Amino acid sequence: MAAAISCSATDLRPLLGAAANATAAAEYICGRFDAVSNKFVDTAYAVDNTYLLFSAYLVFAMQLGFAMLCAGSVRAKNTMNIMLTNVLDAATGGIFYYLFGFALAFGTPSNGFIGQHFFGLSKFPSQSFDYGYFLYQWAFAIAAAGITSGSIAERTQFVAYLIYSSFLTGFVYPIVSHWFWSAEGWASPAHADNLLFESGVIDFAGSGVVHLVGGIAGLWGALIEGPRIGRFDHEGKSVALRGHSGTLVVLGTFLLWFGWYGFNAGSFLNILKAYGASGSYYGQWSAIGRTAVTTTLAGCSAALTTLFGKRLLSGHWNVTDVCNGLLGGFAAITSGCSVVDPWAAIICGFVAAWVLIGCNKLAEKLKYDDPLEAAQLHGGCGSWGIIFTALFAKKAYVNEIYAGQPNRPYGLLMGGGGKLLAAHLVQIVVVIGFVSVTMGTLFFLLHKLKLLRISTEEEMAGMDVTSHGGLAYVYNDEFGDPATPKPGSNTGTTQSV
């Protein structure tokens, strides 16, 4: 943020000559000058906070994308259930991130492991944070919870959703984000001293902090629950349980694409910042534009790679696979979107598509069932994105964005040595370890308490009927609820089960 330019009447007075009113004139001029200068400072705050709030709105809009994607990817009999879980991810996450999450993530002063202030937004706003920053970080927290809900869809008790979502957004995710995004976090690139491998972790918008956290949490939930009934036959062969609406999948994908510009480009947090001397056409606004371009190209590259890759492997042009591939490219580029060139983003998306395809093949062999491929997409592609950043981060971009410590390590393949890669490998290990211990333990306890998985009868009937008062779709209004047609009528639902 630009500082106010001061004017000294004492320094100005000699320049006005020996006139009797020179002192008064100097004081008046400086007073007017200070007022104008303060207006520029106010404008800078307003511009940056407006940019951050707009980015927060974009990231929040991704919740609608998650809801549509999840709804289209499950069978029609579970639509109401998955839609409600997405709504409550946002609502529950809002309360718990307000009470605990933000403080654990960014409560300063703190230690390198956990934040200690701003519980319930006490003493807020401050010189460090305004309300827009809380809103932006909350939108990120609920995105991590939304990822997890996809992995355990169609077979999870509703109370389990409430418990895990509260724990993830109020405790697990905030601690991880403190490590890598708080200025006092032990692995943060903004740490004042003792940077991890002299670099810290450059996870700019959260391939690790958001996507890997959500993916590993979902992985443990799905592993402990086991696959859906009918997902594998008696011989162990994979049986496709296709989602009921490709239309909703495509709609959700485009909404997520739109919101991802707030996710990645918005992570600069402000826009009104010059790189070098003021008055240049090049500044943070240029880096923001470049970040939007790298995000776009990674997704496009991954989508096209998935399209032709799956055509070669299965013989079909599958829109759902292409949508998931596109999102895998976005999840991968999220870490390094601000510090790589556009050509590198194309490589990122290409590899991410094959990572997702490979993870899905492995999941089938291990009889792992994830209705939205969330663990494979966000966990697998997120991990690749962390490694990608350590390989392709460009020196000039790293020094611009992390200007506090010049000449820090950058991408291995760009001539920057292996220190950044070492830091990023540490990130992958500690995130997987911490989330496994916390979320894995939570899901195991829910399983032992019989609070995790629904009964066989409920799963076969669908949770919309057993838990949510009726089906999502009414195909024949003449008879009211299609689940209970009139006697003698052969009219009913035609939905997929």
Image (cartoon, helix red, strand yellow):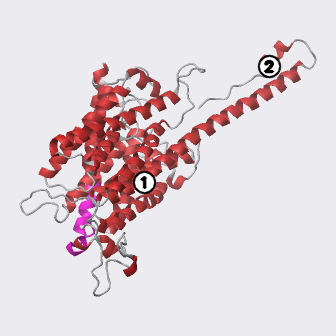
* Residue 183 can be seen, yes or no: no
Q: Amino acid at mark 1?
A: Gln
Classify mark 2: helix, strand or loop: helix
Q: Seen in the image, is 447 located left or right of residue 279?
A: left
> Viewed as shown, does residue 408 lie left or right of 103?
left
Name the spot of residue 353 as percent of width and height, x first: 25, 39
Which of the 4 image quarters holds residue 37? top right
Residue range (magenta): 439-459
Residue ID at (61%, 29%): 2
Callout in the foreground (2, 1)? 1
**Visible in this render: residue 43?**
yes
Instruction: Decide: is 274 above or below 99.
Output: above
Do labels 2 and 1 touch, CB within 8 Å? no
Tell me the residue at 32%/26% (across/down). 392
Task: Return the residue found at the far left.
Answer: 235
Q: In which image quadrant can residue 332 be found?
A: top left
Identity of the amino acid at label 2? Thr
Q: Residue 63's mark?
A: 1
Instruction: Report, in whole angstroms, how far the alpha carbon at label 2 lies from the one at label 1.
Output: 57 Å
Q: Secondary structure at mark 1?
A: helix
The C terminus: image quadrant: bottom left
**Is 367 rendered above or below residue 199?**
below
Image location (x, y in percent) of residue 32: 79, 29
Taking the magenta stretch, the answer to whether it contains residue 78 is no
Residue 440 falls inside the magenta stretch: yes
- Which of 57/129 is in front? 57
